[in-house]
Image: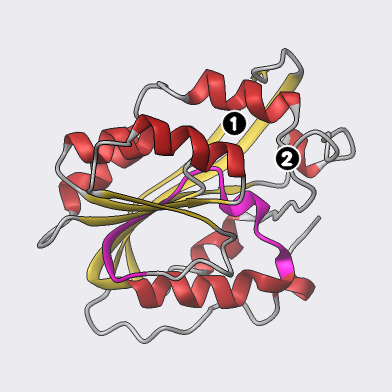
Amino acid sequence: MASDEILEYFETTADRETRDDLRLAINLVEGNKVAIDCGCGAGSDIAFLRSHDFFVNAFDIEEESINRCRIRFKDDSAVVLSQATFNTFKYPKASLLVADASLFFCPAQDFNEVWSKITDALLPEGIFCGSFLGPDDTMAGPNYKKESYWPEILVFSEEKVKNLFNNYNIESFIEHRASGKTPDGEPHQWHIFSVVAKKKSNNASQPTLKSAAAELKR
């Protein structure tokens, strides 16, 4: 069962404003509009993608997320929902893959395999649009409430994020730093790397980190 904090997060983000990086990403997509939304939450990105005529395959680890999205998109046959983890989801071929504030919670030991699946799923010149947690974020420190949210936290330096995209052309790379409060009112320092990148047409799918367990900070 989702915690009160996760439920509050879903309520707060259900109709959030669409991020600039996702607006950029959809304008870079060529060919068939097929998207994967990794960690779909309450469905705000699904709604935006559908408003731009994308067929959306979406998944989330939380049953509450999928139940909400099933109600929200119950009359839309162009939305396919799955309760799954990054490693158990069956990735279809797609021209766009969205992973906003979700790869943060991929277990480190699974990341190389997951990243390979993500790259394999993207068609040549397909677009990745996602974010990675920086080492100065509150979630990367000792005050993160693992018991209220998700226990696995994946942290990247700027260099390690950029190394992931050797087989992509980076269209946008932005480091976000901000102070504020979480939906449940807790103070928070954000440190996030947002990336929009186009897969090279001759890309061979190979993870670029040698070992997630050895390389990633916790």
Q: Closer to the camera, 216 or 29?
A: 29
Q: Is residue 48 above or below residue 123?
A: above
Q: Is residue 43 visible?
A: no
Q: Which residues are magenta?
A: 92-108
Q: Residues within 10 Å of mark 2 (few under 14, many from 20)?
A: some
Would you say residue 56 is visible in this rendering?
A: yes
Task: Name the quadrant containing residue 4.
Answer: top right
Mark nearer the N terminus (1 vs 2) = 2
Colour scheme in the image? Answer: secondary structure
Give the quarter of the image for residue 93.
bottom left
The picture places residue 85, in percent across and down from the top left corner, at: 59, 60
Image quarter where the N terminus lies is: top right
Is 107 covered by the magenta stretch? Answer: yes
Mark 2 is on which residue type?
Asp
Horizontal arrangement in the rendering, residue 182 relative to residue 57 (left or right): right
- From this view, report whether residue 72 is shown above or below residue 76: above
Q: Do labels 1 and 2 touch, CB within 8 Å? A: yes
Query: Percent x, y for residue 211?
Result: 70, 79
Q: Secondary structure at mark 1?
A: strand
Q: Which residue is mark 1?
A: 177
